[in-house]
Image (tube, grey):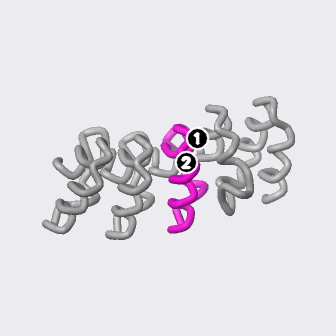
Amino acid sequence: TPLYIACEKGHLDVARLLLEAGAAMDQASNSGATPLYIACEKGHLDVARLLLEAGAAVNQANARGATPLLVACQEGRVEIARLLLEVNAAVDQARDDGVTPLFMACQKGHLEICSPRASRATSRSPSSAAVCGVSGEPARVRPAASRG
């Protein structure tokens, strides 16, 4: 959709105009990705904020079960992950294969997302903490493991 493309490219003013004209903010692509999902994947913080303020579904998953929070963690988008958590994104909503946002962040080496400063929590899963431990950053495991 035009809104999806505007969000993918980071065109904030175009996205705002399309939303004001009544564009469907949660309409998914063939892969199930919504405008919010693609904005989070591409790192467009202002566009993601606009969509969330307009009422976009924060936990709508794509065809594989990945949410905007999971893709933000996958891509190392710390500020976007914080934004999503501020609007109560589901921290433990796993992809169809069981991967959680924290597990993905640790697996990809985006350990700044695992820190307590980045969020109130990105998972309480013991397997997520174990992945952080394997990554060579044991000091970062303690805050994640102590939460749950």
Q: Secondary structure at mark 2?
A: loop
Is residue 97 positioned above or below 142 on the image? above
Picture residue at 18% right of the left edge, 68% below the top: 20
Q: Identify the mark nearer the N-term, 1 or 2.
A: 2
Picture residue at 64% right of the left edge, 46% below the top: 102
Quarter occupied by the C terminus: bottom right
Picture residue at 81% right of the left edge, 51% below the top: 145
In x, y percent, where is residue 66? 46, 45
92 vs 48, nearest the viewer:
48
43 vs 95, nearest the viewer:
43
Q: Which residues are magenta?
A: 71-97
In x, y percent, where is residue 18? 17, 60
What residue would you read off at disc 2? 94
Amino acid beneath label 2: Ala
Picture residue at 65% right of the left edge, 54% below the top: 122
Q: Secondary structure at mark 1?
A: loop
**Is 142 one of the magenta-colored residues?**
no
21 displayed left or right of 144 = left
Contact flag, marks 1 and 2 (Cβ < 8 Å): yes
What residue would you read off at disc 1? 99
Q: Quadrant of residue 27?
A: bottom left
In x, y percent, where is residue 140? 80, 44
Amino acid beneath label 1: Val
Mark 1 crowdedness (10 Å alpha carbons): few <14, some 14-19, many ≥20:
some
